[in-house]
Amino acid sequence: MSVVAAYLYSHGKRVREVAIDERIDCPGDKSQFVWIGVVDPTAEELRALQQAYGLHPLAVEDAAKGAQLPKLDVYGDQLFVVARTAALQEGRISYGETAIFVGHSHLISVRHGSTRGHAALRAQLEASPQLLAQGVDYVLHAILDFVVDGYLPLVEAVEEEVLSMEHKTVDQFLTRGEVNRIFEIRRELIRFQRVLGPAGEVAAKLIRLELPCIDVEARPYFNDVLDHVRRVQAMVDGLREVLTSVFEFSNLLEQQRTGAITRQLAAWAAILAVPTAIAGIYGMNFDYMPELESPYGYWVVLAVIAGICASLYVRFKRARWL
């Protein structure tokens, strides 16, 4: 059975457990509502919920797919909200979906692929009856805030990895695997931004639009969700810039180190060219060459070679080529 919890609440307190095919209407009392949570429901369970609470067929179809971007749809006097959950698993971001049906007397959450259950959230709300008694719009805010708060640990974990990579770049070259990891993280963050943008739009609509089941007093709570989304968006944008700078900085350091090595090799080649040239001249097989019969010619040539090489070494040293 995929039903995790299904309870009737009145004035912020749990009254009793309800069946998913049991319709309960509380039109005159906002504090009385049903909160049902299901995970990976079967087609029969969704059909039972649809019949009991008059859910729109298109919304039920979207909830069954489990692969929607965040969105908000209005069907008559009901809302259909989709939120995407995200978690970091083995270095990659895995996504889930939480679809939420909101009516005046009911809130139904349908989860797919989410690793974070709502048991702790439900317990937290039940521990604050005054907030839970405000109605389904406050529960909707709590679920959306719970989903968005799950983004922060993910981004912080990626941030730590990126900063560690940036620190390592100063001391040594990036390996091919680390370069591949940079582009992998960048791709993951781009996909994550495709979720954050619609999530911010959903929160903005809940703040600005006149929507069924959402009281004016509840709008500031959704503004808090929007602030959290924007904060995560800013962190992701910063991480993308850091990744770009890490890659560019690594390339610059590699070019700088390669240039330094090239200068050193050129300097030593120039120094070694002096004895090579002089030895090459005196190595020619001619019978008549000056200084061949000089008793001090050998030592003079060595002194000239040493002097020129020492002079070149000093000049290259001053130019910081050695």
Image (cartoon, rainbow, N blue to C red):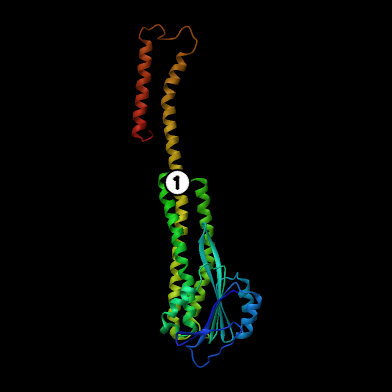
Residue under circle 1?
252
Task: Tell which residue pokes out farthest to the bottom in this image.
Answer: 28
Which residue corresponds to the image point at 47% horizontal and 55% vertical from the top-left? 243
In percent of the image, x 63 and y 81: which residue is there?
Answer: 48
Q: SS at mark 1?
A: helix
- The answer, for residue 56, to whether it is visible in the render is no
Q: Is residue 318 visible?
A: yes
* Mark 1 closeness class: few <14, some 14–19, many ≥20 residues within 10 Å: few
Corner quadrant of residue 68 = bottom right
Depicted 287 relative to depicted 219: above or below: above
Q: Residue 101 appears at what percent x and percent y?
A: 56, 80
15 over 38 or under it: above or below: below
Q: Residue at x 42, y 28 (%)?
A: 268
For image coordinates 35% across by 14% down, the residue present is 300
* Residue 289, picture quadrant: top left
Image quadrant where one finds the N terminus: bottom right
